[in-house]
Image (cartoon, rainbow, N blue to C red):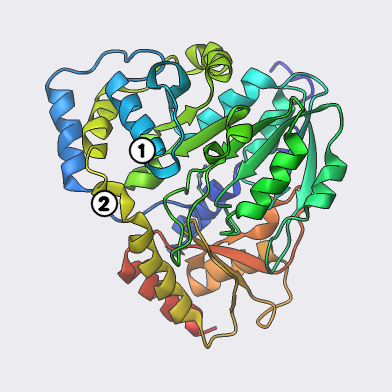
Amino acid sequence: MIQLPLSKLSNVGTTIFSQMTQLANENEAINLSQGFPDFPADPDLLNLVDHYIKKGFNQYAPMGGMMSLKEEIAKKIENAHEAIYHPDTEITVTAGGTQAIFTAIASLIKDGDEIIIFEPAYDCYEPTVELFGGIVKRFKMTAPDYSIDWNEVKKLVSNKTKLIILNNPNNPAGKILDESDFQELISIVKGTSIFILSDEVYENIVFDGKKHLSICKYPELKERSFLIASFGKLFHVTGWKIGYCAAPKNLTDEFRKVHQFNVFSVNTPIQLAFADYMKNEDNYLNLNVFFQKKRDLIRNGLSGTSFELLDCEGTYFQAVKYDKISNKKDIDFAHELTINHKVATVPFSSFYKEKLNENVIRLCFAKKDETLEMALENLRKI
Ligand code: GLN
């Protein structure tokens, strides 16, 4: 066997999401770990896909995506944030959010560039940056409120800073950025050539009447940003792997140079189906109401237990602190919960490079009410 030279990603193993799902399956546990719905998508959407496949729309889509879908995406963004992206030159349909993130980083980052991320951070950011020789600087957000001290963030900025990666709403902390966060960010990047990658895949899942503020709402930020979103989250079809990147033309041009050699183009019939389905805004505008009921089911079910509920302003993840129950590390506690109590979760330490343990785990509530009730029954016994 030929020996591999030093791995390009020597510290990277299988993602925690796959690990916990596998552990859940092996132990026949209720899987509240990996973020995906266990309920079906709307039959109307499934019928549309069926229609386009049977009508013969089964060949390559244009590299940047089907025009009809890109037009609907542009409309959705304009209606929500009053920001204009040109469907032809500024929106690219991707094979999911993760591919869009990879491609944006690949199109921008060179050896020695510095990138600022906020921890807890979604697991693909750092390895992707490393693959292209970038150096990651981290600001740690911590329990219980996961707020950002922008004065500390400023200290991470240097003349090598190339990119700031935001995840808003934040997975796993469920935190959203507010107006003052954006003003601070503007003051940091104004007059610099720092770019922004804004991962907003949970944009439509924000609770308690709060509003999701997108990067594209702020012209000083929009002009330097890749805005990334996901249809998997929007329409309960994570396995279809379709998302998009909206960015000004000069950024989109660079993005597409990589995209064409990475995936070339994304499957045609589903793009056409989404384009039709998106024409009815009701198909996604009530997502927050739908998920807030599930969030509240979990929160009400756990109130009065020894689990401490942290705030959940957005996403379909509820963070809970368990230090009144156990002083085990979160990864060990998550294993114990899966094996002994048959509920799988994700430990927060996996979202920190240095595995910061604050005794917090993440529960995914994108599940049928009956799944959530069963999990609650087990968790209430602890
Ligand atoms: N986004 C999903 C989560 O946070 C997982 C996606 C994946 O497994 N890569 O759980």
- Label pair 1/2, CB-CB below 8 angstroms: no
Q: Left or right: 27 with respect to 349?
A: left
Q: Is residue 360 visible?
A: yes
> Identity of the amino acid at label 2?
Pro
Q: Which residue is mark 2?
A: 40
> Identity of the amino acid at label 1?
Lys
Q: Which residue is mark 1?
A: 76
Name the residue at 54% across, 11% down: 257
Figure check: 206 above or below 76: below
Q: CA distance from mark 1 to mark 2?
A: 23 Å
Figure check: 191 above or below 309: above
- Looking at the image, tell me whether mark 1 or mark 2 is earlier in sequence order: 2
**Quadrant of the image for the N terminus?**
top right
Image coordinates for residue 335, horizontal then vertical, percent = 60, 64
Image coordinates for residue 332, horizontal then vertical, percent = 67, 65
Kindly indicate the quadrant of the structure image that contains residue 189: top right
Figure check: 239 above or below 310: above
Closest to the observer, 310 or 31? 310
